[in-house]
Image (cartoon, grey):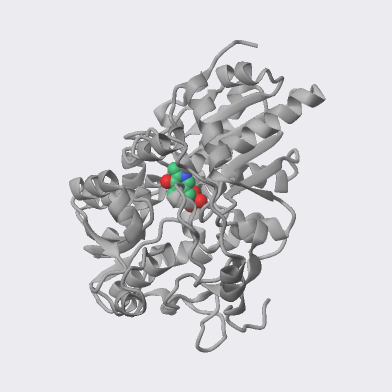
Amino acid sequence: MSDTTKYVLDEERLPSTWYNIAADLPKPLSPVIHPGTGQPIGPDDLAPLFPMALIAQEVSSDRDIEIPEPVRQVYRMWRPTPLIRARNLEKALDTPAKIYYKYEGVSPAGSHKPNTAVPQAFYNKDAGINKLTTETGAGQWGSALAFACAHFGIDLDVFMVKVSFEQKPYRRALMETYGARCVASPSSETNAGKTILAENPNSPGSLGIAISEAVEVAATNDDTKYSLGSVLNHVLTHQTVLGKEAVEQMEMTGNWPDILIGCTGGGSNFSGLVNPFLGKQLNGGPKIRVIAVEPAACPSLTKGKYAYDFGDTGHLTPLVKMHTLGSTFVPPPFHAGGLRYHGMAPLVSHLQDLGLIESRAYHQTECFAAGVQFARAEGIVPAPEANHAIKAVVDEALVCKEAGAGRTILFNLSGHGHFDMQAYTDYFAGKLTDQSYAEEELAMALAGLPAIAAE
Ligand SMILES: *Cc1c(COP(=O)(O)O)cnc(C)c1O
């Protein structure tokens, strides 16, 4: 075999469809429930928030969903993205494992998030919408949607979790450069924000609170819709553009992955990579071990309850069945801001329930150690979120070394860390500590789960 390191697809191999795993699930997803009626919601219930094209994708069971040509045109600015063999990391670990990564940091915003930001902006514009709201934690999603809205000529208000607003001025500057307005959340612009501020004027904010604010603005303004960067089925489907490319690229390498690894915040970059491979497995292809990696300080898949819950703290969203820490759970501050959501995508939760994937959690300092090792070997400085995936890759490669087994590992390097260098500085200064959530707070948040006859 050749010693090729980088596998690049020609522009004409850019996928023309997204893959919707709902078509191949052995058991369908549980329905989304209206909190008032306790009944499954219909498309009209979501119409104030999303354009019909996205609602249709949310409930679709079509296997292949066409990527509109205007979306493909924007994708071509950075797609197809490279798949790279991490030969130097393999050497550094002295492992017989073959390690490959799909690199999504080459997008304008520096992560996988534009893969869904662009189609979401497109479908809204196509439906005549000129204004969107959203939330952002560390600012990755806000900057991806700001880029997409700039392209399609849509105004964007971003509610940014207050601690990040204060700690990450460069992500905010990036959103403003693309023309978005960025508001620290909780804010006094919404009832949801005012309620939180009345209880705690110094609230650091959370994704759950910021979602409430963004949803409230969209629900109460006819000309405004809402956009979410992860968790929902259509978001995960959009991300499969990266996994479909990776399937082709793995075919080019002559190796099929034995192990797939991705970090999970809401589950979108993970699903984007693994769903197309799982689709092959569900249709008779080889069985793959799939590992979702989450932060120990916000462990929805490994410690959460699989139950119906609200997507936001203010309880404005419908109820979805997911692994959840409770909608009022506020994780302790740690640096992978993109992994601080109280729930996990219903689709990822369902895959775990079906035994198709496994999950594990790591603390942040061990993840940074793995990320630094990766940067020194491969040259790319990973986003703190992606360091979680890398930690699992390193551990699995070392298992291979002990077993003398040359397994093939593929992971998603979901973004670069160029806007997160303060986190690296803190790590080198020994200021990063492993955060644990308060058990009482988790118990309280779980006790507050809505009473719904599950299933
Ligand atoms: C937002 C983000 C994540 C986590 O979100 P998912 O929806 O779980 O993918 C992971 N990596 C990076 C680089 C991010 O920006």
In the figure, is residue 148 to the left or right of 375?
left
Position in image of residue 387 (x %, y %): 52, 38
Position in image of residue 406 (x %, y %): 74, 23
Single out the residue that lies furthest toward the right: 403
In the figure, is residue 274 to the left or right of 396?
left
The one of 147 and 451 positioned closer to us in this rendering: 451
Residue at x 65% of width, y 11% of height: 1
The one of 257 and 343 positioned closer to us in this rendering: 343
Residue at x 21% of width, y 54% of height: 180
Total marks in image? 0
Q: Quadrant of the C terminus?
A: bottom right
In the figure, is residue 84 to the left or right of 149?
right
Above or below, 444 against 290 in this view is below
In this rendering, does residue 122 appear at all?
no
Single out the residue that lies furthest toward the top: 2
Residue at x 47% of width, y 50% of height: 334
Position in image of residue 219 (x %, y %): 32, 77
Single out the residue that lies furthest toward the front: 430
Position in image of residue 276 (x %, y %): 60, 44
In the figure, is residue 133 to the left or right of 103?
left
Res 12 → quadrant: top left
Above or below, 356 against 135 in this view is above
In this rendering, does residue 441 appear at all?
yes
